[in-house]
Image (cartoon, rainbow, N blue to C red):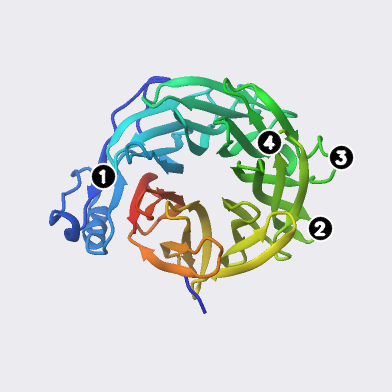
Amino acid sequence: MTSVHAERSPKGGVEAGRLTPVRTPFDSGLLRRPPLRVNGGVIAALLLLAACGNDLVIGVERQIQVRAAVVDPATGDLLQAGSRRGDLWYARVKPDGSIVREQRVDFEGGEDAVNAVVVMPSGWAVAGYATRADGRRTAWVRVLDTSDGEVWTKTYDQNGGWEAQGLAVDPVGTLVVTGTEAAGHGFVQRLDETGGVRWKYSTNTDLQGMVTNLRIFSAATIGQSVQRVVTAGERAFSDGVKPELSQWSLMGDFYDSLRLDMSPGTSRGLLLDLDEATVCTQRGDDVVVRRSKWIKVPEVRHVVLHVDGAKLELGGCAPASDGDMLVGATAVFSDGRRVARAAKVERTAASIRWEKDVSAPDTVTVAGVAADATGGGYLYGHTEEPLRRWTAKIL
């Protein structure tokens, strides 16, 4: 058996970040005491975790939920995004957890959040959802330059209820946006360099019923001789929700959609080769990393990440800089314990390179993993009661 195991700012303003950094004794020989405003239980937990062999940072800003993050290859900074007190939030964060710049956007007073972030050739982009004054949700996308300044911001919806869930950069450097819409359907659209829509599909209305009830969470593109957009998500059938892989051309032609597993579950996170994809899926209490020949063959091989006595909840996956796949998840035990887990899987899902517990607070939720230039990266997510951001370095 394999085991794998925030204070109000003016609208549109920037506020300085505060954090509680903890460095392991093996790295620096120093343990810096958190500010006294952090309660004693948290201080005790951080002192205990300091000897666990990886850098852990817990922000002391309240009400920040990190939903997405990537590493800026030019600087090594973490580009984090999510929500703060119900508003859109994104930030540039140093590896030690200190916030360089952050932005909070209150769209029209409703609940808003950023779900995806991606590095672009001349900056980065974030996407999520914003709630209009009438209660309808709209997909929200913002592109930023290398100094984190706004280049453009757009909203998109069709039939109401759009939420952007995934971002990818196509071979010419523009964005592909995927997500969900009202009534359990989804959308995919390719944008131009100013945010205009080159083409878009609603899985409910635009494909003659071929992929109704398909919600799309992740996207990846591949160039060279095969210019394709591949998406991962979930599709509702009469016997449950199943993980689904779909394929589109860069010109907007829909090729086909493939059910990855007959068991209920979902999929998110993609690593693409010329004619195959490695996809992370949730299946019952386990996370399955499977290799697929895109639309032709649901599975070439797979590995199962499992924790005895716990449900392993998939947070996310990211291609590592050395070509393999990094996986982040939360092991949830019947007694209420929550343990952060990380794994590295060979890029064709032939084997598990390593898997381990990761130092994190007791109330942790792993939202995903961000790859760095060393072949490792960072787990990230949030804690509960109080709601705070956290990251942990993984090798």
Identify the disc placed on residue 250: 4
Residue occupying image coordinates x 41% and y 55%: 364
The disc, 3 or 2, on the residue closer to the chain's N-terminal end is 3
Identify the disc placed on residue 208: 3
Residue 102 is situated, as x and y percent measured from the top left of the image, at 36, 29
Identify the disc placed on residue 35: none
Label 2 near label 4: C-beta < 8 Å? no
CA separation, marks 3 and 2? 19 Å
The disc, 1 or 4, on the residue closer to the chain's N-terminal end is 1
CA separation, marks 1 and 4? 39 Å
The disc, 3 or 4, on the residue closer to the chain's N-terminal end is 3
Identify the disc placed on residue 96: 1
CA separation, marks 2 and 1? 48 Å
Q: Please tell me how crowded label 2 is: few (under 14), some (14-19), or many (20+) other residues with Cα within 10 Å.
A: few
Residue placed furthest toward the left: 29
CA separation, marks 4 and 2? 32 Å
Residue 142 is situated, as x and y percent measured from the top left of the image, at 51, 26
User: For this rendering, which residue is in front, 209 or 324?
Assistant: 324
Q: Please tell me how crowded label 1 is: few (under 14), some (14-19), or many (20+) other residues with Cα within 10 Å.
A: many
| Label 2 residue SS | loop
Q: Amino acid at mark 3?
A: Gln
Q: Please tell me how crowded label 3 is: few (under 14), some (14-19), or many (20+) other residues with Cα within 10 Å.
A: few
Q: Which residue is mark 2?
A: 238
| Label 4 residue SS | loop
Residue 379 is situated, as x and y percent measured from the top left of the image, at 40, 53
| Label 3 residue SS | loop
**Image quadrant assignment for residue 358:** bottom left
Q: Amino acid at mark 4?
A: Leu
Residue occupying image coordinates x 57% and y 30%: 174
